[in-house]
Amino acid sequence: MKVYLKRRNGDVDAKGIFDESTGALTVLKGSRVSGQVHHTEKFRGAQTIEVLREKYVANGVVKEDVLFKSASTAANFVTGSSTNGLTSWKTEDGVQLRTIVKG
C-alpha cells in the first residue's frame, strides 16, 4: 500500500510502500528527506541514519528505493529524528498506518 510522510514546512516529502504482511516499509526513490540528522539522547539511531543517508541520499533526495524492517525506522531515515512511523506515515486519504495495522 502506498503511504506518504510530509512535513508542513516542506522539508520532508516522502513516498513509500508499506507491506502489511511483514510490517516492512520501502522509502521510494525521489523522496525528499530532512536536511539534517538530529543527535539527541532520545534518538540513538542517528549514526545509523547518517550512514544510510550517505549511501542512499544525494542533495536531500533518495537515489534508489530503500527497504526498512519497520515503518518507524523508515520515518527516522526520512525525518532525521526519532519518529513514530505508525502515526507519521499516512495513506493518500490521510489515514495513519496505526489505524490500518490495528485493523
Image (cartoon, rainbow, N blue to C red):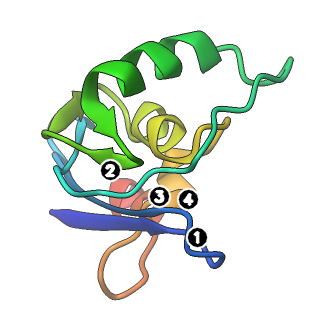
The reply to whether the C-beta atoms of the residues labelled 1 and 2 are less than 8 Å apart is no
Q: How crowded is the residue under tag 1: few (<14 C-alpha within 10 Å), some, or many (20+)?
A: few
Q: Are marks 4 and 1 in contact (CB under 8 Å)?
A: no
For label 2, count other residues whose C-alpha is less than 10 Å away and answer few (under 14), some (14-19) or many (20+).
many
Q: Residue at x 49, y 52 (%)?
A: 86
Q: Is residue 86 among what the camera can see?
A: yes
Q: Which residue is mark 2?
A: 61
Q: Is residue 44 above or below residue 85?
A: above
Looking at marks 4 and 2 on the same chain, the residue that comes earlier in the sequence is marked by 2
- Count of numbered tags: 4
Q: Quadrant of the C terminus?
A: bottom left
Q: CA distance from mark 3 to mark 1?
A: 18 Å
Question: Mark 4 highlights which residue?
Answer: 87
Inspect this view and state whether residue 68 appears. no
Would you say 50 lies left or right of 13 here?
Answer: right
Between 27 and 36, the one lying in front of the other is: 36
Residue at mark 2 to residue at mark 3: CA–CA distance: 26 Å
User: Which label lies toward us, 3 or 4?
Assistant: 4
CA distance for labels 3 and 4? 6 Å
Please state which of the two labelled residues, at mark 1 or mark 2, is closer to the viewer. 2
User: Mark 3 near mark 4, Cβ–Cβ under 8 Å?
Assistant: yes
Left or right: residue 48 versus residue 24 is: right
